[in-house]
Image: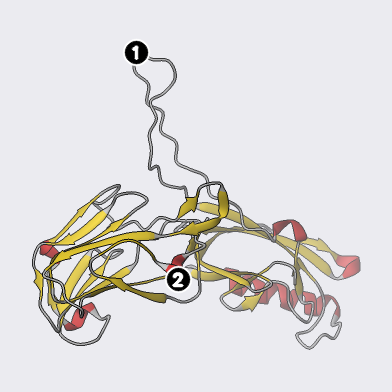
């Protein structure tokens, strides 16, 4: 199966041939990196600045619109106009981010997108055909898996591989953490960046500390749940260190094995005192891709 896109569940290579994507637009573009040039007198070149974020990406979706009905019957120029109207309605969503899904074979990636511009259609009256291009923006930069995966590790434990996140190529800044007590001052560290999120209190036996890394929130709950709203807020007792820790917690980052770009894993260290056989750390997240 060749690569194709779905926008809010609508195939942009329509199965009945109402419209088709131009082949050259079927590959996801790689995001650029924000550039910072820092030079000082008396030193050649620029000072290296590490940990720069990626820029939001844009991609063109070039579509050819045909005269076929949704059932595959040629309806002439009138049907081509109906198809253009249907595409215009799909691309005209402005009140929310749309879901763009990229599929090739068994690989599926999704991203929230906004349609930035749609070119005026180019008509070919004799052929009852038109062409138009829509430019979509991925504000969040990264493509993700469709569903979350959950991993459970030891507390404490060093150099633990978060197996469901293996294969990621981009950072993951919106993971949910869950520490099961007993655990005194538990902390979780991303091995690749050294970023850490730590709780200054104690998670008692039978309690769970929930940390929303993307929402910068934390709570202690007494039931087997991932819902922070059902517990006691302890956000003020969380300390975060590492790159960008002022506005994101535990920036999980895949590390490549030496000499093997196909081997990419997220590794974490978990630390706490007063732990027992019941203590554990869990991570719920989706893989991220450039």
Q: Earlier in the sequence, mark 1 or mark 2?
A: 1
User: Dot 1, crowdedness within 10 Å: few (<14), some or many (≥20)?
Assistant: few
The answer to whether 32 appears left or right of 3 in the picture is left
Q: Quadrant of residue 226?
A: bottom left
Image spot of residue 124 (x, y percent): 85, 63
* Front residue of this view, candidates 84 and 258: 258
Label 1 sits on a secondary structure element that is loop
Q: Quadrant of residue 67?
A: bottom right
Q: Nearer the viewer, mark 1 or mark 2?
A: 2
* Front residue of this view, candidates 198 and 86: 198
* Front residue of this view, candidates 265 and 223: 265
Tell me: residue 156, above or below residue 36: below
The answer to whether 115 appears left or right of 155 in the picture is right
Image spot of residue 65 (x, y percent): 77, 69
Q: Residue furthest right?
A: 126
The answer to whether 190 appears left or right of 44 in the picture is left
Determine if residue 93 is in view: no
- Quadrant for the N terminus in the image: bottom right
Q: Residue furthest front?
A: 277
Q: Which residue is mark 1?
A: 41
Label 2 sits on a secondary structure element that is helix
The tag on residue 164 is: 2
Tell me: residue 229, above or below residue 138: below
């Amino acid at each position: 199966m060749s690569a194709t896109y779905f926008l809010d569940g609508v195939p942009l290579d329509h199965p009945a041939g109402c419209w088709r994507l131009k082949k050259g637009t079927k590959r996801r573009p790689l995001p650029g990196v924000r550039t910072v040039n820092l030079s000082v007198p008396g030193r050649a070149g620029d000072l290296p600045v590490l940990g720069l974020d990626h820029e939001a990406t844009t991609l063109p979706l070039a579509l050819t619109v045909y005269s076929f009905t949704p059932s595959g019957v040629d309806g002439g120029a009138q049907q081509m106009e109906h198809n253009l109207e249907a595409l215009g309605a799909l691309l005209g969503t402005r009140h929310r981010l749309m879901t763009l899904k990229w599929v090739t074979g068994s690989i599926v990636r999704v991203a929230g997108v906004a349609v930035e511009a749609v070119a005026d259609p180019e008509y070919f009256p004799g052929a009852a055909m038109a062409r138009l291009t829509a430019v979509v923006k991925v504000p969040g930069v990264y493509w993700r898996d469709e569903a979350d995966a959950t991993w459970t590790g030891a507390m404490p434990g060093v150099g633990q591989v978060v197996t469901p996140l293996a294969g990621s190529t981009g950072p993951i800044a919106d993971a949910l953490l869950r520490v099961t007590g007993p655990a005194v001052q538990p902390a979780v560290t991303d091995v690749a960046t050294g970023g850490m999120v730590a709780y200054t209190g104690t998670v008692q036996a039978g309690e769970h500390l929930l940390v929303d890394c993307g929402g910068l929130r934390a709570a202690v709950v007494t039931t087997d749940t991932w819902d922070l709203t059902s517990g006691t807020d302890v956000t003020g007792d969380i300390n975060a260190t590492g790159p960008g820790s002022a506005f994101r917690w535990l920036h999980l980052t895949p590390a490549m094995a030496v000499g093997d770009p196909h081997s990419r894993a997220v590794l974490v260290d978990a630390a706490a005192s007063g732990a027992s056989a019941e203590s554990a750390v869990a991570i719920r997240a989706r893989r991220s891709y450039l």
